[in-house]
Amino acid sequence: QVQLVESGGGLVQTGGSLRLSCAASGRTLNNYAMGWFRQAPENERGFVATTRWGGGRSYSADYSDSVKGRFTIYRDNAKNAVYLQMNSLKSEDTAVYFCAAGLSGGIRAIDYDYWGQGTQVTVSS
């Protein structure tokens, strides 16, 4: 059974930075896509970023337009972990952030099989 545990959320001012971490256990996820989604109150869970095996010797990354250029997703397979570096945070980034793992690695929540419990990110102006 795969378990994902997020950490690193908190309260930050507009323009600040946070790094979210997601530690996986129960299975090595080197071959899985690892993604981040977020959900604000009264909103659906939306795609933020994903990293998946892109062939060759590297992983590829995709981002939603709203975070492109500000957020960076990266993984450490030795630690079975994925991270989300968030810079230049805006109030609209306020949400619960979820880590997810799946073989498909798309931008839809249904593309992922395993989910963490989420970590709250609050950006104050």
Image (spheres, rainbow, N blue to C red):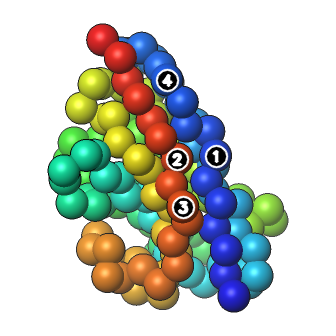
Tell me the element at label 2: strand
Q: Mark 1 points at which residue?
A: 7
Q: Earlier in the sequence, mark 2 or mark 4?
A: 4
Between label 3 and label 1, give the one nearer the viewer. 3
x and y percent of residue 5 in the render? 65, 60
Query: Mark on residue 117?
Result: 3
Tell me the element at label 3: loop
Vertical order, 12 against 35 (above or below): above
Q: In front here: 71 or 118?
A: 118
Q: Which amino acid does label 1 sit on?
A: Ser
| Residue at mark 2 to residue at mark 1: CA–CA distance | 6 Å
Which residue corresponds to the image point at 61% horizontal and 53% vertical from the top-left? Answer: 6
Q: Visible in this render: residue 77?
A: no
Q: Mark 2 points at which residue?
A: 119
Q: Which amino acid does label 2 sit on?
A: Thr
| Residue at mark 4 to residue at mark 3: CA–CA distance | 18 Å
| Residue at mark 3 to residue at mark 1: CA–CA distance | 10 Å
x and y percent of residue 70 in the render? 36, 33
Tell me the element at label 4: strand
Q: Name the residue under label 4.
A: 11
Q: Quadrant for residue 47, please give it.
A: bottom left
Q: In this view, does 67 lie to the left or right of 87?
A: left
| Residue at mark 3 to residue at mark 2: CA–CA distance | 7 Å
